[in-house]
Image (spheres, rainbow, N blue to C red):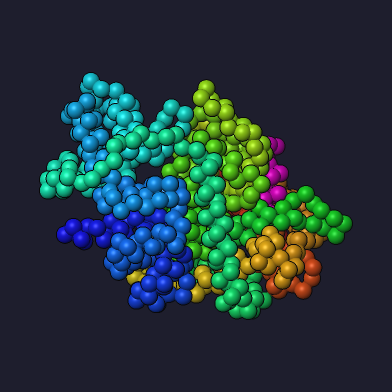
């Protein structure tokens, strides 16, 4: 049994310490059969791969793996058999020291500590408000901070004085045994284990740790691009000569239907825009670039997270491969807005995409609208509290977010309490999700097809991701392709502005009020969308620039009209306006 548990913990350690690409390389080097069926690390399931490696190695081979492959430096693992701190692996577990710290805290807090740990076992995260009822004598904040000092819990969310804590996965069996949920034999083994004295944690250096994450993301992009250039370059160029926005739309419609596809189309198009290249006209620069932030908002359960997160990052358990640029999407699930503002310093002068799955949570605390508005504008951020000053620094990246609103028969109302939130919405390309019968049916059908394995995205996702990554690398002048392909700006033609004039006039005719409820920024977002979408034509154009394509302009106009309708509380029907101008 101990051997099986050691293998399981070894698998958890490997999954936490290494990226998917690292696991693939390790498995290939060890000639483990599981890895023979994959051509690259992007195809593997990290959990399966970690367990396969763990099952085929002994502890000497584990030490060799960590000496030959650099683990994620910010990862900390304190298990029963293994410890990983500051990038160094120890074949001695941490549980004895942790158990001794736990006994000291039990003597100090008694049954109240037991009640707290029992509650934490049933929840992923916990706050002071969640545990007040479990305490009569002790201060719950003091108990949680003591647990954190002895490394028994970790901070998972922090904003000002508000914090949330969680139990590290590798410590769950120890806590279960202490609470009587597992045999006491485990505790007897822990008591006799060799241990180092309990130590207290130090305050995290957010910028330093984030720089390590950026280094790994840069390495992820370089490795993927290098593999593409070696094995799939000619194939990707051939694909690029027939690929455009219409081909992408057809691919997504074949997967998800005529209602759901548009959200994924926006997400993937935004990825092309991340190159953030200049947009020009025949007489010079326009001051515009192709980058923009995306927001999907509406009722819960309408597929917002699927489009902004799963389609871009991938979800192996659901057989959804990643479509986004490798190493350029920073997932922000669980981080607080204050943490975001801290780590944003590490991204100054860099362009990444921050995926925020529940944007509402960023506005649970006052004072967030102004710094986030500056972030959307790529402005200079400075944030001050009585404890610290962050910045000033210029934020140069973008967002892909989703958030819930109350949707009515016509229009919607945001659930964010800050009345200035509209300033944030105004700076993103936004799309409303309403749970219509058509959307409900398509969500149900897509879920069923994914569950039954009837949707196969592997080939299409690989081709699109290869094309996207190559175009991104060319347009950002990546060293691996700088001398092989020319940089091309996006050319805005007079027709773009002629169409915008027609659309604007048609919309204003439909609005009876004197006051317009959307700003001129909406046109700017439409132009940026068209520029990003036109980059899909990079290999189709023999010119030294990429012109705004007819397909890109048509979709940009559709977005403009639909968003203007939503902002105007849907006092006109978008399809009637589009029928007049297209």
* Left or right of 250 on screen, residue 24: left
Residue 273 sits in quarter: bottom right
**At 22% from the left edge and 30% from the top edge, which residue is drawn?**
104
Q: Nearer the viewer, residue 266 or 339?
A: 339
Vertical order, 211 against 247 (above or below): above
The verdict on residue 524 being magenta is: yes
**At 75% from the left edge and 61% from the top edge, which residue is drawn?**
490
Residue 175 sits in quarter: top left
Q: Nearer the viewer, residue 431 or 310?
A: 310
The verdict on residue 101 being magenta is: no
How many numbered markers are drawn? Answer: 0
Vertical order, 76 against 108 (above or below): below
Q: Position of residue 550 (x, y in %)?
A: 71, 66
Segment colored magenta = 514-528
**Residue that lies at the very extreme toward the right in this rendered image:** 283
Vertical order, 444 against 133 (above or below): below
Can residue 6 be spotted in the picture?
yes
Q: Position of residue 148 (x, y in %)?
A: 34, 34
Q: Position of residue 188 (x, y in %)?
A: 13, 45
Q: Nearer the viewer, residue 89 or 333?
A: 89
Can residue 250 be spotted in the picture?
no
Q: Position of residue 493 (x, y in %)?
A: 80, 61
**At 55% from the left edge and 47% from the top edge, which residue is drawn?**
211
**Residue that lies at the very extreme toward the top in this rendered image:** 137
Vertical order, 352 against 536 (above or below): above
Residue 531 sits in quarter: bottom right
């Amino acid at each position: 049994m101990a051997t099986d548990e050691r293998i399981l913990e070894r698998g958890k350690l490997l999954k936490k310490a290494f990226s998917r690409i690292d696991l693939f390389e390790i498995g290939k080097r060890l000639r483990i059969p599981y890895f023979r069926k994959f051509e690259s690390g992007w195809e593997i399931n990290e959990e399966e791969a970690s367990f396969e490696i763990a099952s085929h190695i002994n502890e000497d081979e584990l030490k060799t793996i960590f000496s030959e492959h650099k683990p994620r430096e910010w990862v900390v693992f304190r298990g029963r058999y293994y410890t990983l701190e500051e990038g160094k692996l120890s074949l001695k577990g941490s549980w004895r020291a942790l158990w001794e710290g736990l006994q000291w805290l039990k003597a100090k807090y008694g049954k109240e500590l037991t009640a707290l740990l029992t509650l934490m076992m049933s929840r992923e995260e916990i706050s002071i408000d969640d545990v007040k009822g479990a305490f009569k004598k002790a201060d719950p904040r003091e108990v949680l901070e003591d647990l954190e000092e002895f490394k028994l819990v970790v901070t998972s969310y922090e904003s000002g004085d508000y914090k949330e804590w969680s139990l590290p996965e590798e410590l769950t069996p120890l806590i279960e045994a202490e609470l009587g949920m597992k045999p006491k034999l485990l505790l007897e083994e822990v008591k006799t284990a060799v241990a180092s004295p309990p130590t207290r944690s130090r305050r995290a250096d957010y910028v330093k740790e984030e720089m390590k994450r950026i280094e790994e993301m840069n390495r992820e992009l370089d490795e993927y691009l290098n593999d593409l250039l070696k094995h799939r370059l000619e194939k990707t160029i051939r694909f690029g000569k027939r690929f455009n926005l219409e081909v992408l739309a057809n691919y997504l419609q074949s997967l998800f239907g005529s209602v759901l596809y548009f959200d994924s189309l926006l997400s993937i198009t935004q990825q092309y825009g991340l190159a953030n290249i200049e947009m020009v006209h025949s007489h010079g620069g326009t001051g515009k670039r192709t980058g923009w932030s995306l927001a999907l908002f509406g009722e819960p359960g309408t597929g917002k997270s699927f489009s902004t997160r799963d389609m871009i990052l991938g979800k192996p358990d659901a057989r959804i491969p990643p479509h986004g640029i490798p190493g350029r999407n920073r997932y922000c699930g669980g981080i607080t807005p204050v943490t975001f503002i801290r780590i944003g310093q590490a991204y100054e002068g860099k362009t990444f995409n921050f995926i925020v799955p529940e944007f509402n949570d960023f506005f649970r605390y006052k004072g967030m609208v102004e710094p986030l508005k500056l972030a959307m504008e790529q402005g200079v951020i400075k944030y001050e509290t009585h404890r610290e000053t962050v910045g000033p620094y210029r934020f140069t990246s973008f967002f892909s977010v989703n958030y819930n609103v109350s949707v009515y028969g016509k229009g919607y109302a945001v659930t964010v309490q800050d009345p200035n939130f509209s300033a944030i919405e105004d700076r993103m390309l936004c799309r409303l999700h309403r749970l219509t019968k058509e959307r409900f049916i398509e969500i149900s059908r897509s879920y069923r097809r994914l569950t039954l394995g009837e949707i196969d995205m592997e080939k299409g996702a690989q081709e699109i991701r290869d094309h996207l990554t190559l175009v991104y690398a060319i347009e950002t002048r990546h060293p691996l392709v700088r001398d092989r392909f020319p940089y091309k700006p996006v050319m805005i033609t007079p027709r773009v502005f002629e169409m915008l004039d027609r659309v604007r006039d048609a919309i204003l005719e439909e609005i009876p009020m004197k006051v317009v409820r959307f700003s001129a920024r909406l046109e700017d977002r439409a132009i940026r969308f068209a520029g990003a979408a036109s980059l899909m034509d990079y290999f189709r154009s023999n010119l030294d620039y990429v012109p705004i394509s007819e397909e890109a302009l048509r979709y940009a106009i559709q977005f403009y009209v639909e968003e203007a309708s939503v902002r105007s509380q849907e006092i006109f029907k978008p399809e009637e306006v589009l029928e007049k101008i297209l």
